[in-house]
Amino acid sequence: MSLQFHNQLTKAVDTFSPLKDGHVSLYTCGPTVYNYPHIGNWSGYIYWDILVRVLQANNLTVTRVMNITDVGHLVSDEDDGEDKLEKSARREGKTAWELAEFYTTDFLEGMDALNLVPPTHIAKATDYIDEQLALVQTLKENGYTYQISDGIYFNTAKFPQYGDFAHLDLAAQKAGARVALNPEKHNPSDFALWKFTPEGEHRDMEWTTPADLTDNGTERSGFPGWHLECSAMAMNILGETLDIHTGGIDHIPVHHTNEIAQSEAATGQQFSRLWLHNNHLKVNGTKISKSLDNGFTLKDLSDKGFSPLDFRMFVLQSSYHNEGNFTFENLTAAQQRLSHWRTVAALRHQTHDTIQNDDEKSTDDQSVSLYAASQALLEALSDDLDTPEGFVIIDDAFSRLERVPVKAIHQHAFVSFLATIDELLGLQLLQTTPDIDDDEKRLILERERAREDQNWKLADKLRVQLEKSGVTVRDTANGPIWEYS
């Protein structure tokens, strides 16, 4: 089966094959841990989780690195302004180290709640300072840096292909540049590799700038610019050329463009062969912003009765290419869809197959279609992570299942299909749909006998008793079907 993805580097849908047969190197831009991530942040991580699952389902071993930006992410892409971590730490009465640790823990707990496959390596920027300084040293030796009063910068004019990745018009940028931003920069697109701590100030997070990096050969305190860490960690762990690099579309014009420039200027090799980007998630048709107070967190959703898996379901209903629109009405619809899928998944506990009749059903149309649906789902997701098409396949298969008697369902084919859904989409249908206990099954049988005896009063009493334990019984022409209340 071929894997195809839309590659930002080529602006086309490319067939993917890794550099090393059977192994994929993957880098994902991780969080800046100065606050709780909002639902727009989480949507990208959900899509890249599907990417990992699809690669693995195609028999590829994935080595994935995700960074934790616990230092160096400044207020603006122009490297102007105050460090977000330092600013948030003062606001919360903590050190920058304490703040980073708190929000890193929160992020990792959120990953677990959303059932995201853990990366092979979770790399903190503060653990790779030496590697970042070594990269600056290499860039200096290769002639790509210059120093001004506030730090060491990358000279984009020395890298002629700088604007190619994002189709940047550098001439227009230069003509319209606001000199007030930083009049010392040689070019508006130049970016900080390493910042100096201002004279007379002390930061929670700062390191000694080696003397051989400064123009006058003296040591001074400093800290990394926020683009540097991704290149340093990715190449240190995965090698000079990656198979896949992922992130949000907002990273294309600055962060990822800068990563490519500093990485390829240092090594002379292609940095990543495939670049994937997820689109924005809006809320009620507007951009997520602090002023609108619409940056909902997973806790905000929980407070309104929605689980992390409800949100995961909502995200995956749309393609990662398309701009999403979050409303609580849309989330409710996703929650209801997931609830329905769980109701269908629970039918596996009511099939009562034996080995013999399971074999007898193994060649009928309904059973064959279930096995085919598993393959069709993998093929849909292997085609540029087409989750909407995957959902159509699942809905169609479930609809057909609900139209046949439970006793006609091929149990192995059905369970195999549910396992495929969980493997590829991470919705935990098997885990969240346990069988009912023996007492509840006994009550269902007693109610059925009462109905056969036309003892409606007893049947209603047993129905109410079941509902109190969280089980609803639906009467069909082929017998009773239980569902979760």
Image (cartoon, grey):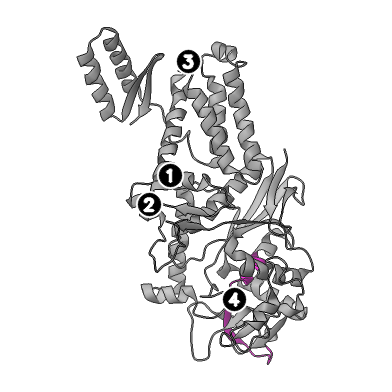
Apparent side of residue 252 relative to residue 116 in the rendered image (left or right): right
Horizontal and vertical percent position of residue 93? 36, 74
Residue 57 appears in the picture as rendered: yes
Where 327 falls versus 173 (above or below)? above
Stretch in magenta: 214-233
Q: CA distance from mark 1 to mark 4?
A: 38 Å
Disc 3 secondary structure class: helix
Residue type at mark 1 is Asp
Per the image, the residue denoted by label 2 is: 301
Earlier residue among tags 3 and 2: 2
Per the image, the residue denoted by label 1 is: 310
- Where is the N terminus found, in terms of image quarters? top right
Disc nearest the viewer among 3 and 4: 3
Mark 3 Cα shell of 10 Å, populated few (<14), some (14-19), many (≥20)? some
Quadrant in the picture for residue 144: bottom right
Outermost residue to the top = 453
Where 218 falls versus 320 (above or below)? below
Residue at 74% in and 60% down: 241
Earlier residue among tags 3 and 4: 4
Horizontal and vertical percent position of residue 130? 64, 73
* Residue 231 part of the magenta-drawn span: yes
Where 135 falls versus 409 (above or below)? below
Per the image, the residue denoted by label 4 is: 224
Residue type at mark 2 is Leu
